[in-house]
Amino acid sequence: MKVSIFNDVIGPVMRGPSSSHCAAALRIGRLARDLMDGSFTDVLVEFDVNGSLPNTHDTQGSDMGLFGGLMGWDAADERLPGSPQALRDTGVRIAIETVDAGDPHPNTYRLTLHSPEETHTLRAISTGGGMMEVLDLDGFAVSMFGDCFETLLWVKGQGSAVIAALENRITADAILLHEADGRQLVEVKADRFVPDDILAEIPGIVAIRRLHPVLPVMSRKDTSVPFGSCAEMLDYDAGRGTPLWKLAVQYECARGGLSEAEVVAKMVEIVRIVRRSIAEGIAGTEYDDRVLGHQCGRFDELMKAGRLLDGGALNRIILYVTSLMEVKSSMGVIVAAPTAGACAALPGAVVAMAESMGLDEEAMARAMLASGLIGVFIATRWTFAAEVGGCQAEGGSAASMGAAALVTLADGPLHQAVAAASMAMQSMIGLICDPVANRVEVPCLGKNVMAAANALSCANMALAGYDPIIPLDEVIDTAKQVATQMPREVRCTNLGGLSITPTAIALEEKLAAKRAAACGVGCGCG
């Protein structure tokens, strides 16, 4: 699947502490619900003992997202924090177990869903920023990203004949035959489901399921994009000096089959969501189950009174970044840009700087589009998942994207936007992910502020002609290599760094006891 700015980089619009936990799990849950045709009585969730999820699934939002998806809710639904109990209230029995499955990916979900009529299994991974992939369905090796309408047909020994019949009747992106243990599954990927009347004409089909897409931008057969790396983009531009945001529009038009106006309008709407969230955060947020309370309001008061050190536009950036982080921790609506854990650095810096410069929302959207294209290069070559890459994958990516966005606000040329992105990523290679009390707040707040300040610094350096030396693609590849040298304890597992300080452990125990007391039903949520 080709990377999309709106699928993989800027978005989803969501609630929850972590996109790789909450939003991705919700999408997995939505697909699992469709697999059961919306009806099930038992859910078994299994996490590999050596992955990140046994220690983080509860407090970082996997449970909230997965069970919300099984309820059929979307990622911004205000009911999400109560989804585990809501699912139980429907009579569904939930079991969560840790197993030694040898799963190579740290964010692997194994689901077994049962009803009186049927049982289905599903294995999926969260790949970062809310993206996911289904790898196994009922023992069949598959590859599903939630980017199309999936019609699944269980057949008895007549798979090839069923495919031939379908090919004569429909147009599809792909019609695939999967085989396992003498069983056959035909998978149809298309821009719509195969109609019932057509399926009724084809013998040999014993069961049918339809999985709805969960991504905002659909994939199409033989989709072609103009470039997939920074080097390819520069070759494509061929020295014309096309602004980075315009290249982003060209890319996304090709990827999603959208018009230029549609691409810009989508990003303007995202900017408006971010601005509403910033205002909400400054006004004040409340949420019991978090480490940090409302702090940015005091910063706002002192900044307006001239009682802070003079940081110029940086102070407004700090205010907006901290505001967005407080909205996230209060389960308010945020945009994963590129992730929920790093949701504040990029949009906070862009909106604050644009307002300081007197620019409008379309200018903000152009800057965000420019950042999105840098994110495309990162997602294509690597990941946004801290469980794989540490915080260099989240905060480092946000800083790199933000630096290019700020150069775009200043009308800097293409080569300076790319230079800023390279310098910003270089300075955050090796950054670990070690959240305190298993919440995505500390030191995540400071790392988002650092990423935004880094973005501003590198943007100004690039505008002044500083040389990044190392090309962006090589910097991304280096961060990917460094990630393989980082122990799992410092990649969002709650097993290393600040996560295991005495204070962090005490805070986690205190919050767990508070949650258990508030719940009072013995469900094990604490």
Image (cartoon, rainbow, N blue to C red):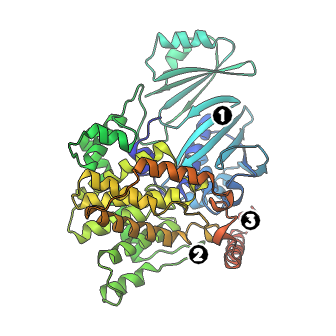
**Secondary element type, mark 2:** loop
State if disc 1 and disc 2 touch (CB < 8 Å): no
Query: Which percent across, then down, holds residue 246?
Result: 25, 46
- Residue at point 58% right, 63% down? 432
Q: Quadrant of residue 13?
A: bottom left
| Mark 3 burial class by Cα count in 10 Å: few <14, some 14-19, many 20+ | few
Amino acid on which disc 2 is placed: Val
Amino acid on which disc 1 is placed: Asp
The label on residue 136 is: 1
| Mark 2 burial class by Cα count in 10 Å: few <14, some 14-19, many 20+ | some
N-terminal-most mark, 3 or 2: 2
Q: State which quarter of the image contains the C terminus.
A: bottom right
Q: CA distance from mark 3 to mark 1?
A: 34 Å
- Residue at point 30% right, 38% down? 235
Pointer 3 residue: 521
State if disc 1 and disc 3 touch (CB < 8 Å): no
The label on residue 291 is: 2
Horizontal side of residue 124 vs 467, given as left or right: right
